[in-house]
Image: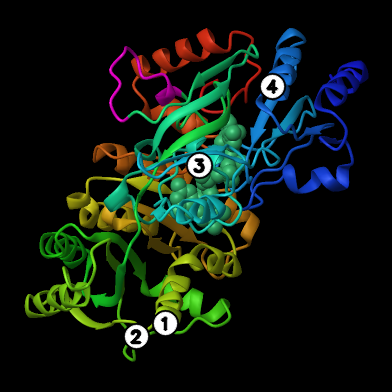
């Protein structure tokens, strides 16, 4: 049943002029997710600009059983940020809540509203000689509230952790409209349950994050990148251990790029080229960074030492070190366009898995064999954050298959891969979350006691099930 017109009018009035849209042309980009796998509809997009208005809207929705989908930059990859197709869910976009509330350089923190775009958070930190170290390819659109709600990972987890490690305090509008003020810059606070942890990675199912206090770090003064060819996965994990050992813990990124992924990227993404003259099966893009001046630590020498030792040990077959920032960008473009490039090769079935780093070679061998047995001609493109044990095990369709026929096998292929992941003690969602996409998979693999506790928490905070219903837990 569609939302009553009187309710829609009341919500527009609460939100205020210019803070809503019922124009379907304006709403359109808010009801489709980046991969185009999910789309939905809504009669109303609300864009409040203060926590008080968010609270009033949510209170109204709570009183009248109106379902809400919180939305940041809408770059999430599991269908959690868009409404379903019933038309009964409204969107609350945080995009107008994009102000900085406080900067505290001596505490190495800043407090921002949740609609601040990630790349703008980087610039804000920079104004006080600090850095905010969360980096993802979608940082030009993804917002702090979305990053927190999805507990985003990205390329620097190796050194700085996931979003959970970067948040000190939160302000949240709870499903009944109450405002919980947990904004604090404290690094130590053992006064009972740490409530903010419920909302980090909560995917908007327990409340709407309106502001956050973020941890900042000293800015990098040196950065060194290398793109190397390696023989196989075993060499990759051994190189990681060696690089961590030699780098004085300055290794911040360690990403894997397979031959096929590199070929797709070079073929389909303008300006991309193979940095090496020979063809190799596997490549690692790694980066060291430090806030130390060069006279205290010569990072170039550190990278040289890593490469030299790795070559002597037979781990690295070939490699290149960029001479300037432009060349460094070129290398990172290869990594960042890898997902996009796969779109040009027809259907792609995605997996965002993690296992212990030491088990990556075994996982890749088992999973590749299993999907090739299940579907001859399938083209695995495993790439990503191998330094964190996180592989985007994407599967491009066989060349001679219809895209729709291939995508119809999505769930079967997921099952094949996820069974292996779980058998190896891994996770079926390393960094993208559950959303709508993986609800059934979560129910299959999470122990019943975990699911029960999660449902109990949901019922306690959101007894009317109005906040992003059906995402994570049903
Ligand atoms: C090209 C590309 C690269 C990516 N790379 C990475 C990567 O390396 N690592 C990674 O972890 N992810 C990655 N992602 C996924 C995505 O960008 C992240 O999950 C990001 O953190 C989502 O932020 P967002 O603002 O777009 O959130 P949205 O997509 O708008 O929302 C994500 C979830 O959070 C909820 N939500 C949003 N804002 C709030 C709020 N204020 N309060 C409560 N709930 C809220 C939504 O309801 C939804 O469930 C990538 C995506 C793309 C398109």
Q: CA distance from mark 4 to mark 1?
A: 47 Å
Q: Where, quadrant-wise, is the N terminus in this rendering? A: top right
Q: Earlier in the sequence, mark 4 or mark 3?
A: 4
Between residues 466 and 373, which one lies in front from this camera angle? Answer: 466
- Identify the residue under disc 1: 327
Q: CA distance from mark 1 to mark 2?
A: 6 Å
Query: Circle 4: is it few (<14), some (14-19), or many (20+) Cα within 10 Å?
Result: some
Magenta stretch: give its range: 187-198
Q: Is residue 245 left or right of residue 362?
A: left
| Ligand 1 occupies quarter | top right
Q: Nearer the viewer, mark 4 or mark 1?
A: 4
What secondary structure predominates along the stretch shown in magenta?
loop
Q: Are dots 3 and 2 in contact, CB under 8 Å?
A: no
Rendered location of residue 273, percent (x, y): 46, 84
Q: Nearer the viewer, mark 2 or mark 4?
A: 4
Query: Circle 2: is it few (<14), some (14-19), or many (20+) Cα within 10 Å?
Result: few
**Label 4: element kind:** helix
- Identify the residue under disc 2: 323
Q: Nearer the viewer, mark 3 or mark 2?
A: 2
* 11 lies above or below 399: above
**Label 2: element kind:** loop
């Amino acid at each position: 049943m569609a939302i009553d017109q009187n309710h829609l009018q009341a919500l527009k009035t609460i939100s205020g002029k210019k803070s809503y849209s019922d124009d379907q042309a304006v709403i359109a980009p808010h009801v489709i997710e980046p991969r185009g796998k999910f789309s939905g509809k809504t009669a109303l997009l609300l864009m409040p600009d203060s926590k008080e208005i968010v609270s009033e809207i949510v209170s109204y929705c709570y009183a009248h059983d109106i379902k809400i989908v919180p939305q940041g930059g809408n770059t999430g990859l599991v269908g959690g940020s868009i409404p379903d197709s019933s038309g009964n869910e409204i969107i609350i976009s945080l995009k107008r809540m994009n102000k900085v509330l406080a900067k505290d350089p001596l505490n190495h923190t800043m407090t921002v509203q949740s609609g601040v775009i990630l790349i703008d958070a980087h610039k804000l930190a920079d104004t006080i000689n600090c850095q905010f170290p969360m980096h993802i390819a979608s940082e030009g659109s993804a917002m702090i509230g979305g990053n927190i709600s999805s507990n985003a990972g990205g390329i620097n987890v190796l050194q700085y952790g996931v979003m959970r490690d970067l948040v000190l305090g939160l302000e949240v509008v709870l499903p009944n409209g109450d405002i919980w003020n947990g904004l604090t810059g404290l690094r130590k606070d053992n006064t009972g349950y740490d409530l903010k942890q419920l909302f980090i990675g909560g995917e908007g199912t327990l409340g709407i994050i309106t502001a956050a206090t973020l941890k900042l770090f000293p800015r990098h003064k040196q950065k060194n990148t290398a793109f190397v060819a390696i023989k196989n996965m075993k060499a990759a994990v051994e190189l990681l251990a060696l690089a961590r050992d030699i780098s004085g813990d300055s290794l911040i990124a360690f990403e894997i790029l397979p031959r096929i992924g590199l070929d797709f990227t070079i073929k389909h993404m303008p300006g991309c080229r193979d940095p090496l003259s020979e063809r190799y099966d596997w490549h690692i893009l790694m980066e060291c960074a430090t806030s130390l001046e060069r006279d205290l630590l010569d990072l170039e020498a550190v990278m040289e030492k890593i490469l030299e030792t790795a070559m002597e040990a037979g781990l690295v077959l070939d490699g290149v070190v960029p001479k300037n920032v432009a060349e460094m960008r070129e290398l990172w473009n290869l990594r960042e366009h890898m997902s996009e490039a796969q779109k040009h090769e027809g259907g792609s079935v995605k997996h965002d898995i993690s296992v212990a780093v030491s088990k990556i070679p075994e996982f890749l061998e088992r999973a590749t064999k299993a999907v090739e047995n299940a579907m001859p001609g399938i083209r695995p493109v495993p790439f990503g954050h191998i330094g964190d044990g996180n592989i985007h095990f994407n599967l491009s369709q066989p060349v001679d298959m219809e895209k729709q026929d291939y995508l119809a096998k999505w769930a079967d292929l997921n099952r094949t891969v996820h069974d292996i992941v779980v058998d190896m003690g891994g996770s079926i969602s390393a960094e993208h979350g559950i959303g709508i996409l993986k609800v059934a998979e979560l129910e299959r693999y999470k122990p019943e006691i975990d699911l029960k506790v999660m449902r109990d928490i949901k019922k306690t905070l959101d007894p009317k099930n109005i906040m992003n219903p059906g995402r994570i837990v049903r």
